[in-house]
Image: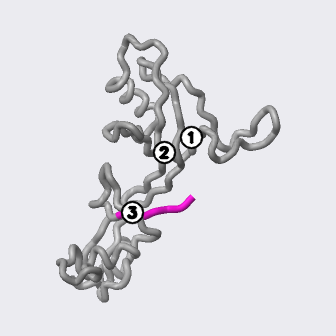
């Protein structure tokens, strides 16, 4: 599973292509790419980032009550019938997932699968519908915000908690 980084201010419903590190964003942020545009940040500025690890798509059945009818299995659960772990692409919920969103409706998102099911039922399922609906959900783990300071030469990022950041001049 690969980790992709994003400047916090670019995180929205439609994401740009992620980068393999926070520093990979420096040319974009400091204007080193496309010299005709003004830099958004300069040495000494603090920039907030988050990374994401995508876990893939799961399908669950959501009842009108907001309950989940599909039993999700932990990816580490041994299959009782053959003693093997389920394949990676099976309908599994990653234990550290904290982002769930509907592939068909970008406005429905939650940081828990239960919260997602309740929101989805409230907005998308008629109370008269007794069987519920199967919903494909994209799952991921997003980090907390991580702050960096752009180094004096503009070529690297220094963790904002580092003592070096107090010496960075803007």
* Image height of 116 relative to 15, above or below: above
Q: Main secondary structure of the magenta part?
A: strand
In this picture, residue 151 sits left or right of residue 71: left
Q: Position of residue 95 (x, y in %)?
A: 57, 44
Residue under label 1:
93
Is 91 situated left or right of 50 in this image? right
Secondary element under disc 2, as helix, strand or loop, is strand
Whole-percent x, y for residue 142 in the image: 43, 53
Residue 3 lies within the magenta run: yes
Dot placed on the residue nearer the N-terminal end, 2 or 1: 1
Residue 39 in view: yes
**Quadrant of the rendered image containing residue 76:** top right
Separation of residues labelled 2 and 1 (CA atoms)? 8 Å
Left or right, 80 with respect to 93, comes to: right
Real-space Cα separation, disc 3 to disc 2, in angstroms: 17 Å
Q: Secondary structure at mark 3?
A: loop
- N-terminal-most mark, 3 or 1: 3
**Residue 117 point in image, percent of width and height:** 43, 29
Q: Which residue is mark 3?
A: 17
The residue range painted magenta reads: 1-6
Q: Which residue is mark 2?
A: 139
- Disc 3 crowd, CA 10 A, few/some/many (<14, 14-19, 20+): few
Q: Could you tell me if the residues under marks 2 and 1 are in contact, i.e. CB atoms within 8 Å?
A: yes
Distance of label 3 from label 1 (alpha carbons): 24 Å
């Amino acid at each position: 599973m690969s980790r992709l980084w994003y400047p916090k201010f670019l995180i929205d419903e439609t994401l740009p292509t992620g980068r393999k590190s926070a520093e990979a964003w420096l040319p974009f942020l400091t204007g080193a790419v496309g010299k005709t545009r003004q830099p958004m940040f300069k040495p000494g500025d603090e920039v907030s980032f988050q990374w994401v690890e995508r876990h893939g798509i799961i399908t669950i059945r959501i009842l009108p009550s907001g309950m989940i009818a599909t039993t999700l299995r932990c990816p580490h659960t041994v299959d009782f019938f053959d003693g093997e772990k389920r394949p990676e692409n099976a309908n599994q919920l990653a234990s550290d997932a904290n982002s769930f969103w509907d592939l068909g409706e970008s406005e429905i998102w939650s940081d828990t699968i239960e919260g997602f099911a309740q929101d989805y039922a409230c907005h998308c399922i008629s109370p008269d519908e007794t069987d519920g609906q199967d919903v494909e959900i994209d799952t991921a783990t997003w980090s907390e915000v991580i702050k960096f300071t752009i180094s004096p030469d503009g070529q690297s990022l220094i963790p904002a908690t580092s003592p070096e950041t107090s010496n960075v001049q803007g």
